[in-house]
Amino acid sequence: MSNNGPGVTNPMLYDPPEGQASNTKLMQFVAGVGVSFAAISAGTALGWTSPVLSQLTPVVENGTTPSNSTDGFTITTEEGSWVGSFLAIGAFLGALPAGVLAEKIGRKYTTMSLALPYLVSWALIIFANGAGMLYAGRFLIGIATGASCVVAPMFISEFAEISIRGALGAFFQLFLTVGILFVYAIGPYVSWVLLSVMCAIFPALLIVAMFIVPESPTYLVKTGRRSEAAVALKWFWGPNCNTQNAVEAIQSDLDAVKGEAKVSDLFTKAINRNALFIALLLMFFQQFSGINAVIFYTVPIFQSAGSTMDPAICGIVVGVVQVLMTFVSSVLIDKAGRRVLLLQSSFIMGSCLVVLGVYFKLQADKADVSGIGWLPLASVVMFIISFSLGFGPIPWMMMGELCAPDVKGLASALTVMFNWSLVFLVTKTFGTMQDTLGADWTFWFFGFWMAVGTLYVFFKVPETKGKTNAEIQALLGGK
């Protein structure tokens, strides 16, 4: 296709007269949903073990196995632990190739290609006849999940206009929680095989969506296809948008960072180093918020408050709260800004963790806590709300905002690899921490990191709301 900009050779790309240009947001949201089928697919993979492991590793009662426990075979508790852990290992290994592939073949086709490992992994799981096939399926779905964490936020950040970049940037975490909720809501009531079949629907929908959504305008300009970029912008931003100005703005950002980026550029150039460091630490505080510890203790905390709620219903309640509050975050993020939501998140989560630690300390000391059963319950609810408003979605969104176009693929890949390393570390050591330190000190440990996170966000994390990429790079450079 010709590389000419709008003009006589491209009559469909005529821009409206100066002062009459206007953008529409509908198709940007449609595209955000389409790309986010990758996030839903990742969410179903993440949530899958919660209802399934109890079926695959059933508790034997009176010498018999519950009739709905499995579809042909069982696994040991240790094997079940590895079924969960293989996803994190695969996600770590899938991140870097995804960043490289996104630079080679584009965001659109990389996102579309993710459907293949998702579908193959679900096929391996559906037809599994033992732990080995489950390991293979979970490892492969981990690769797809890690790749999704890199490509989807990057893709969305490159077609979203500034006024809604935060809202669309929160879509990844929002639809991740939708996928988790889907599994929590369906999983306890169907066999794990049927659940896996249903989960395979979402990567199939991802393929359909990627046939509709155009390529990233930034990638198209970067590869010299300005006319195609203009066509894509007309699709994303509406027929009355000023594509010449938009293409020139993208070109200007790219010209500011000429040349092929190398891994060393992330560390030798101060601006890139600052962006990467902030993205890494936001991911660190996300995983060391104690979210996994809080969710692990949700059922006993509900019970201590006098609730007789079924654990499956408890999981659904937590999932609904996460989805609703992440949606609220997507609405607020372009109004309140990133820093305010991050600060409230770390401060409130840290306070809730301190309260939970005190509660479990009193319980361990045999104190009567029956009168304050509502307190840890309120803390859990507030914690999940604050996480979903701040440190749940914002690190993923800012990962796509902070980095310059030439290093975005590499930086996103390294950030996601770091995130999944932390997921593996926290998941694998949580049981040991619980046994060694007790529930009280485990909560206080995570509470300490939330205090550190509050200080870090206050002093070091810039506000990116309403800023262009060039303005964000200037902020990171201290200008």
Image (cartoon, rainbow, N blue to C red):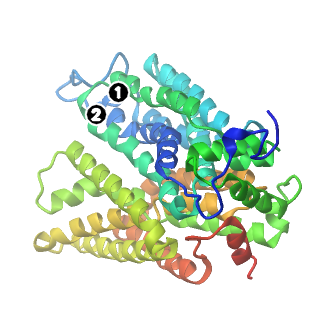
**Three-letter amino acid code of the residue under disc 1:** Leu
The quadrant the N terminus occupies is: top right
Left or right: where does residue 49 sit relative to residue 12? Answer: left
Q: Position of residue 135 (x, y in %)?
A: 53, 29
Q: Position of residue 82 (x, y in %)?
A: 50, 37
Point 73% across, 75% down: residue = 474
User: Which residue is more in the foreground, 359 or 364?
Assistant: 359
Q: Is residue 390 visible?
A: no
State the mark number for residue 186.
2
From the top left corner, tell me how far across and down residue 351 is, in percent.
35, 77
Picture coordinates of residue 61, whole percent (x, y)? 19, 29
Residue ID for mark 1: 195
Q: Vertically, is 109 above or below 146?
A: above
Q: Amino acid at mark 2?
A: Ile
> Toward which corner of the image does residue 322 lie, by quadrant?
bottom left
Give the camera-side residue of 49 and 276: 276
| Sequence-earlier tag: 1 or 2 | 2
Asked if disc 1 and disc 2 are in contact, CB closer than 8 Å, the reply is yes
SS for callout 2:
helix
Q: Which numbered circle lies on residue 164?
A: none
Q: Is residue 466 above or below residue 399?
A: below
> Is residue 32 among what the camera can see?
yes
Decide: is 233 above or below 245.
above
Q: Is residue 468 found left or right of 395 in the rendered image?
A: right
Q: CA distance from mark 1 to mark 2?
A: 7 Å
Residue occupying the point 57% across, 79% down: 456
Left or right: 246 as drawn, with respect to 28: right
